[in-house]
Image: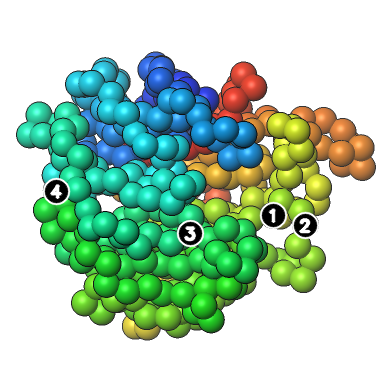
Amino acid sequence: MKPTLYAGIGADLVHFNIDVDSATLIRRGTVRLPALIQYAWPHASREFLYVVSSDKMPKMEGPGTTHRLSTFRIGPKGELSPHGEDISLADRPVHCSTDIPSDHVLVAYASPPGLSVHEIKPDGTVGELISQQPDLQVGAYPHQIRLHASNKWAFVVDRGRNKKPGDPGSIQEYEYSGGKLRHTGTVAPDGGHAFAPRHLDFHPTQPWVYASLELQHKLSFHRLDNGRLSDPVCMLDTLAKPDAVKPGQCLGTVHVHPKGHCVYVPERGTREVDGVVHYVGGENTLLVFAIDPESGEPILIQRVQTQGMHARTFAVEPSGQLLIAAHKSPVNMPEGEGKHVVPANLELYRIADDGKLTLAGSHDIDTNGQAMFWAGIV
């Protein structure tokens, strides 16, 4: 199977083949989900894709009525076909992933905060819900759940409730076995009141973990020892002008390069008012941090101004030669910027040997009034 990009645009999951040599995308097909796509994760075999969707979105009133976990079979050219029955979920799913052998799929819910773990049957379909300990601690706003490569430890990234003093952020730690989670600890420097992690990623070979702090605009570096994370070893600024933060500015997700020599995070500088996204002078950049091979500490080596705005998600192609950034919505530019609309787009960047990025191409995306809320590569 050639590398394939999937982009969730509203309820449509669009399939693109990636030509790595020419750094281009070839649009192939679309499947429709029961509701708006939130996140997706591939089976370890790369034969199946698990997708969570919901009709409840941030800033929407009411609980919503449709929250689903869907399974698709992945064909030899990346084409998708429904596989088994959709599973109803308790509330809006924010993130999903599988354990390392894909024996279970794990789902994180933000409001109300919660987790669910579901069996994956030998044929790839989703089976029974796995019961967990009563009152399992998950934090105030779970935004990601990930399994370490050992398959022994799980981590929930708890973004917290913005700047509410009663709901600080944290990273929650668990022992994991056979779909069961046992809470073992919490990382929350200074009580988590200036710690709002969005996502984390693991180094492929070393006990190093990198987290993006959404509201603090920092890349946080932690060491991992037998399933326990250290407090941040360092937290590095991601804004060029950290003392002049614009409304709506936030840090995005984080990915370590497959070779483990660098780590990437995007800054997103737009503001949504009444469903319309505007540029108000924020920073829209991709940041490249080299990873010190001895200490694991990140070092900023490049800040790239993107052409699109608000890269909510991005992915690194498995060979490590391309990075693809998904800018989620059209953005209205103000009069002073030569009033016009910057379209949603997919930007492709060549990755040099040192991890630095060079823009190689851009594909404008007609989102038809929806948001390109997630994109990823299988």
Binning the other alpha carbons within 10 Å of mark 1 as few (below 14), some (14 to 19) or many (20 upward) gives many
In the figure, 136 relative to 19: above or below? below
Amino acid type, residue under disc 4 in the picture? Pro
Give the mark nearer the N terminus: 3 vs 2.
3
Q: Earlier in the sequence, mark 4 or mark 2?
A: 4
Q: Which one is nearer the viewer's eye here, 241 or 26?
A: 241
**Is the image coloured rainbow, by chain, by secondary structure, or in one colour?**
rainbow
Categorize mark 3 by other alpha carbons within 10 Å: few (<14), some (14-19), many (20+): many
Viewer-nearest residue: 251 or 122: 122
Q: Which mark is residue 246?
A: 2
Q: Which residue is mark 4?
A: 101
Left or right: 263 in relation to 70: right
Give, as a three-letter code, the residue at label 1: Gln
Q: Does residue 333 lie above or below 191 as drawn?
A: above
Q: Residue at x 63, y 39 (%)?
A: 59
The residue at 32%/74% (across/down) is 185
Of the 4 image quadrants, the one containing the N terminus is top left
Q: Secondary structure at mark 4?
A: loop
Disc 3 residue type? Ala
Determine the CA span between mark 1 and mark 4.
37 Å
